[in-house]
Image (tube, rainbow, N blue to C red):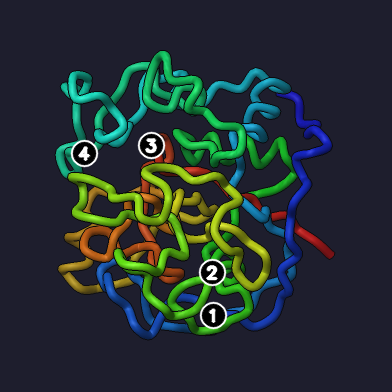
Amino acid sequence: MSQEPLAEVRQSTIRVPGGQSLLGTGRPVLTADGEGPLRKTRVKPFRIDATAVTNARFEDFAAATGYQTDAEKLGSSFVFQNFLPTAKRDRPRVAAAPWWCEVRGASWREPIGPGSADLCEPDHPVVHISWHDACAFASWAGGRLPSEAEWEHAARGGLGDVRFPWGDEEPDDIGYFPCNIWQGTFPDKDLALDGFAGLAPAQSFAPNGYGLFNMVGNTWEWTSEPFKVRSLKKSARAAHAGTSGYKLVKGGSFLCHASYCYRYRIAARSGTSPDSSTSHTGIRLVYDTD
């Protein structure tokens, strides 16, 4: 595999200052996920993509290297049921989350299966990307996946102890839509009051204080770290039984809503199998700097 990235791969990055930062929250909501406590940490300066990696950038990588994603090699990926015509929803499903359908032929190139290449918009975040795929892209692009501390430091945008990248004001289903999340009753119908039922372009909504777009909502983003919950409580251990080997994802997605998956908060966290891929998980890289 060629390791020479194209010139445009490193464009649109933002320098994030180092120093003392915060990790976690003193106001945990999903305590079993290990959101708290709020603690201080230090990070070195780094650069980070202003947006999630787009289909156009990933296409550069695939064209230059011939890389095939895990979904392409496996021959299937998981698609949110509402993206499929009713007649095509009779598919294998995830028992714990039956709104996910396994679709043969679904991949980043054809997001809801064969014949859907027109939905692979160049300016949208690339999805159906496993952790293995994200690492391969990062190596080629000269970057790496962020640590949880780096991701949270960037997401806070210089605001400190806040719940969201824009501050503490809560999104709602009425008139305040600062990010791409679900409106309505999940999983029946997304009212799309924020303008999007599904993915939004990678550069949409207002950026945070560092100039970063969609740090929460739109797509989950892989980090470099394993998903670990440092808790001795039986309830926490039970909630994450079977997640050994999972990788940490941050940021939530367009499927999140306060009534179901309130994980579009900076401190929120989840774990995903490194070989799994879905229509709401993507990539954002960081780059070491002097």
Residue type at the position of mark 1: Leu
> What residue is disc 1 on?
22
User: The residue under label 4 is which amino acid type?
Assistant: Trp
SS assignment at label 4? strand
Q: Which of marks 3 and 1 is nearer the N terminus?
A: 1
Name the residue carrying label 2.
Answer: 152
Provide the residue designation for mark 4.
Answer: 99
Question: Residue, x 39% and y 42% (percent of image)?
Answer: 198
Task: Kindly identify the amino acid type of the residue bearing the numbered disc 2.
Answer: Glu
Q: Residue at x 61, y 73 (%)?
A: 157
For the point 69% across and 20% down, which residue is it? 63
Residue at 43 percent of width and 20 percent of height: 116
User: Residue 151, image x and y in percent?
Assistant: 56, 63
Along the polypeptide, which appears first: circle 3 or circle 4? Answer: 4
Neighbour class for label 4 at 10 Å: few (<14), some, many (≥20)? some
In terms of depth relative to the viewer, which is nearer, 96 or 110?
Answer: 110
Of 217 and 86, nearer the camera is 86
Q: Which of marks 3 and 1 is in front?
A: 3
Corner quadrant of residue 236 = bottom left
Q: Are marks 3 and 1 in contact (CB under 8 Å)?
A: no
Q: Position of residue 246 (x, y in %)?
A: 38, 48
* Distance of label 3 from label 4 (alpha carbons): 12 Å
Q: Which amino acid does label 3 sit on?
A: Thr
Mark 4 or mark 1: whose residue is earlier in sequence: 1
Query: Pointer 2 and pointer 1: residues touching (CB < 8 Å)?
Result: yes
Split into 4 quadrants, where in the image is the C terminus?
bottom right
